Amino acid sequence: MKIKTLVIVAALALLIAVFFYSRRTQPVEVEAHSLSRGEVLASVANTRVGTIKACRRAYLAPATGGQVAALHVKEGAKVKQGQLLLEVWNQDLKAQVELQKAQIKANRASAEQACQLAGGAEREADRLSRLQGSKQIVSIDQVDKSVTSSKSQRAGCRAAQQAIEVAEAQLAVAEAAVRRTLVLAPFDGTVAEVNAELGEFVTPSPPGIPTLPPIDLLDLSCLTVSAPIDEVDAASIKTGMSACVSLDAFPDKRCSGVVTRVAPYVLEKEKQARTVEVEVTLNNPKDLAELLPGYSADIEVQLSQKSDVLRVPAEAILENNRVLLIGDDNVLHEQSFQAGLSNWTFTEVVSGLKEGDRVVLSIGKDGVVDGALISIKHD
């Protein structure tokens, strides 16, 4: 009987032990990081996605509408400044140019004739004046008529010369009318799009109503990244600061960028934060490789840098500069610290933590709180 009782008591004790063992706190598996020294860059980044832009872009159309008579380029063609790209029908205007050139020739001939006659009349008047003064064989009336005629002839010469200038001005007007029918390249570039065909009618865009341009010309000799920066962060950005560019289409950052423009105004978007447009230019030819205007891109402007400081990963930081330290007993302890420079990756530790301290990276995981028992995940 006693033996049976002892067996029952032992079984009950075992069951109780198993129950409490099963109810014990299970450690939470977390990722950990040991604090070390390294580089920290203070930087700011764009609030909304930016865009790769060509350093120059021109949407080209003739100044006057008409039927496309000649199309001298295709998409992808490289052109030089001043090269003729497109021509609207302008035979009537070119005929006006030829007419004015012929008129100038006729006016020059008339001017030559008038000036020759004026010269002859002046010589005749001079001869009669000398005869009247020396021998008085010529009347004063004859001399007066001769002098008046010579002056009249000289005035006709000047009028004929003025007619040449008028004809030349009219020629300039006719040539300007022809130029309004031509589309010339304003800079060296690459033709991105051609939205016209021979025989089609093209017209300039009416004011306030943008239409598809016949030719879209890009200058790809340099590329910029234009991105909006929050107005609070933009105040600390200056031209000449270094910047990195990240693109969804490529894995690596491109860090040869320099801030080349900070817009002198703030953009106000409905239901969105106010921003300032910042442009970054990439200077390394390798960083420009494979980039195309229109790619989405992000910029990170470097404000300041420290090369050998104690730092903590950004993903380990709670609100108000707090971290969860891992004690020797694998129990978490909340610890505040004083922060210095900061970016999206690391924050400088000024005080409150020391090198070698272990902090939790998995701060968003359930159960990762002050006082929790944890186990460290190993790769």
Image: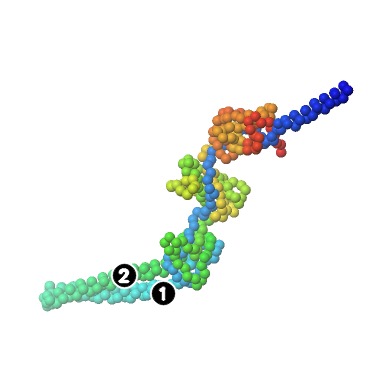
Q: Position of residue 284 (x, y in %)?
A: 56, 48
Q: Nearer the viewer, residue 292 or 221?
A: 292
Q: Nearer the viewer, residue 115 or 33?
A: 33
- Amino acid at the residue labelled 1: Asp
The quarter holding residue 255 reads top right
Q: Position of residue 376 (x, y in %)?
A: 70, 34
Q: Position of residue 316 (x, y in %)?
A: 61, 36
Ranked by sequence position, the earlier of labels 1 and 2 is 1
Which residue position is annotated with label 1? Answer: 92
Quadrant of the snapshot with the C terminus = top right
Viewed as shown, does residue 129 lie left or right of 119? left
- Amino acid at the residue labelled 2: Val
Quadrant of the snapshot with the N terminus = top right
Query: Is residue 257 something that shows in the picture?
Result: no
Q: Residues within 10 Å of mark 1 (few under 14, many from 20)?
A: few
Which residue lies at the image location 47% right of the left edge and 71% below the top edge? 67
Disc marking residue 166:
2
Q: Residues within 10 Å of mark 2 (few under 14, many from 20)?
A: some
SS at badge 2: helix
Query: Is residue 157 something that shows in the picture?
Result: yes
Q: Residue furthest front?
A: 1
Which residue lies at the image location 47% right of the left edge and 68% below the top edge? 202
